[in-house]
Image: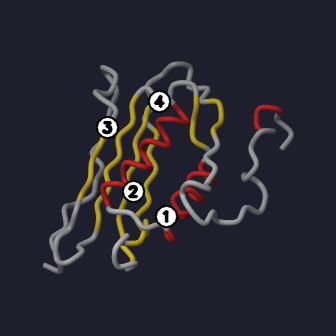
Amino acid sequence: MSDDRYRALNQLGQSAPAPTSPDEAVLERVEARTGGKNAVVRFTCPEFTSLCPITGQPDFAHIVLDYIPDEWLVESKSLKLFLQSFRNHGGFHEACTLMIAERLVELLNPKWLRIGAYWYPRGGIPIDVFWQTGLPPEGAWIPDQGVAPYRGRG
């Protein structure tokens, strides 16, 4: 990469193996350059996978991350690798959801962040987990996450 602002990125533009755990995963960031505007950035991961910490069986979720950056954006390839690292991670739905949010808040210190994790049923009961840092800035347009509640096959 020719731009000096991107020299610190170690995953973008090159082969980067999937981390074996979320703790091992490296999240990277780039300068936001939004001019102070309250632009909402959305990442959608409709095929998120982790493991039940008790049975080792896979759990699946549709995750929607919305945030309003301050100085930093998360570099998307590093986010993809971070989310992929949960495939071998045993954690309850709530813990996985909050781990994702907390790592992003720590990395980015955004003006605002929310996560919606729509987990597919386990034992016949879907579990949805929601969290946000607080109220969004006044005047920011926050779209609906667009994920319908689980209704089975009907």
> How busy is the neighbourhood of tag 1: few (under 14 within 10 Å), some, or many (20 plus)?
many
Q: Earlier in the sequence, mark 1 or mark 4?
A: 1
Q: Earlier in the sequence, mark 2 or mark 4?
A: 2
Compared to 109, does 86 lie above or below?
below
Disc 4 residue type?
Answer: Pro
Q: Position of residue 4 (x, y in %)?
A: 83, 32
How far apart are the two marked residues, 3 and 2, measured between alpha carbons?
15 Å
How far apart are the two marked residues, 2 and 4, measured between alpha carbons?
20 Å
Disc 3 residue type?
Answer: Gln
For label 2, the residue is 96
Question: Which of the pair 128/30 is nearer the observer?
Answer: 128
For label 4, the residue is 110
Give the number of marks: 4
- Asked whether the beta carbons under mark 2 and mark 1 sit within 8 Å of each other, the answer is yes
Q: Residue at x 47, y 30 (%)?
A: 110
- Asked whether the beta carbons under mark 2 and mark 4 sit within 8 Å of each other, the answer is no
Query: Residue lying farthest right?
Result: 2
Q: Nearer the viewer, mark 2 or mark 4?
A: 2
For label 1, the residue is 86
Disc 2 residue type?
Answer: Cys
Q: Residue at x 34, y 26 (%)?
A: 140
> How busy is the neighbourhood of tag 4: few (under 14 within 10 Å), some, or many (20 plus)?
some
Q: Position of residue 55 (x, y in %)?
A: 34, 79
Looking at the image, residue 35 sits to the left or right of residue 7; the answer is left
For label 3, the residue is 132
How far apart are the two marked residues, 1 and 3, measured between alpha carbons?
21 Å
